[in-house]
Image (tube, rainbow, N blue to C red):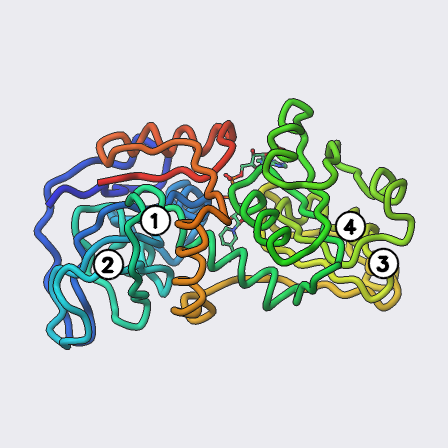
Amino acid sequence: MKAAVTTQAGEPKVIQIQDKPIPSLKDGWVLIKVKAFGLNRSEMFTRQGHSPDVQFPRIQGIECVGEIEKDSSGTYKKGQKVAALMGGMGRNFDGGYAEYAAIPLTIIFPFESDLPWATLGAIPEMFQTVSGSLNQALEVQKGETLLIRGGTSSIGMLACQLAKHYGLTVIATTRNADKEQHLKDNGADHVLIDDGEVSSKLKAIFPDGVDKVLELIGIASLKDSLKCIRPKGTVCMTGILGGKWTMKEFTPMGDIPSMGRLTVYMGEAGNLDKALLQDFIDAVANGSINIVIDKVFKLDDIVQAHTYMESNQSKGKLVVEI
Ligand SMILES: NC(=O)c1ccc[n+]([C@@H]2O[C@H](COP(=O)([O-])OP(=O)(O)OC[C@H]3O[C@@H](n4cnc5c(N)ncnc54)[C@H](OP(=O)(O)O)[C@@H]3O)[C@@H](O)[C@H]2O)c1
């Protein structure tokens, strides 16, 4: 089979297209004929060498969609459409950047859909992250206000659509004023330009603060995001787009407003419900959710795809179709 192998930590060119044997199966594993996969920033960090537990060479890819090629457990029939994500995929064992992937049954999610593979490829990890952050970590409710910090990211764009679907008022941020209309077209009720501080601009619209904040920039803007919540409001840090992993000075009684809540979301396959995924795929198929895909690449163009992801130019999900 053809596979994109990350040969060592480094620049995008460390990923090489190679011929590899089709993986053999262990008990409790299935073979997927991969049709598409979404690109994820965590894969970029891993490729850059920021995942000490990942050994190279490695076929990366923490998610994929495709068809069952072989399942000796008899759980799934050949040709059944499935998604797979997380659980060490593309990190502790070879993942989705290949024509075939051997995947444990525990992280397989069957679905029915006639959507194009490129659209389906954008969904699993993005949906798991957004749904888990909004429903499980932030416990959003109809009628609430939600600030999405890092609104133009693919996670941010989908979070806005899902939050609107649930009946929330959404305020989305970008550093780039040229993307304001793009955010409004995606459903945002208000757009704030993020120059590192948005709390005063937000308080000019919502003097008491917002109910919930989805923090996708991370440490770099966390203290300012905590200033945006109303009493008993919640900030959930799900992303780290700002690239800073630790905070040197943090004063809980001071940085967290009185009775404010701070949480994080680090989703796993176990956080995704099979029925919820099918409902979401159906919502995409009937047009009530619009998956924003910026570019679709071929497997041969994986170096170009990683270079593009690193350039921060994308305005939506990046997908590779096989
Ligand atoms: N916790 C989890 O389970 C989980 C799962 C998946 C992803 N994530 C995280 O979620 C975040 C979003 O991922 P994604 O794939 O949706 O991202 P993405 O689509 O690649 O995001 C790109 C956008 O991020 C913004 N950005 C980039 N660098 C930035 C910086 N230094 N400061 C502020 N904004 C910056 C830019 O927006 P503007 O130029 O418009 O400002 C850019 O358009 C990532 O941190 C990712 O690691 C977490």
Mark 2 is on which residue type? Lys
Mark 4 is on which residue type? Lys
Q: CA distance from mark 4 to mark 2?
A: 43 Å
Are the residues flagged by discs 4 and 3 in contact, CB closer than 8 Å? Answer: no
**Residue 298 sits in quarter:** top left
Question: Which residue does the numbered mark 3 point to in the structure image?
Answer: 230
Q: Position of residue 129 (x, y in %)?
A: 51, 57
Helix, strand or loop status at disc 3: strand
Q: Residues within 10 Å of mark 3 (few under 14, many from 20)?
A: many
Tell me which numbered mark, 1 or 2, is placed earlier along the sequence.
2
Mark 1 is on which residue type? Leu
Viewer-side label of 1, 3: 1
Helix, strand or loop status at disc 4: helix
Question: Which residue does the numbered mark 2 point to in the structure image?
Answer: 81
Q: Closer to the camera, 157 or 259?
A: 157
Q: CA distance from mark 1 to mark 2?
A: 10 Å
Question: Which residue does the numbered mark 1 point to in the structure image?
Answer: 120
Tell me which numbered mark, 1 or 4, is placed earlier along the sequence.
1
Q: Residue at x 64, y 22 (%)?
A: 178
Q: Where ligand 1 lies, by image quadrant? A: top right
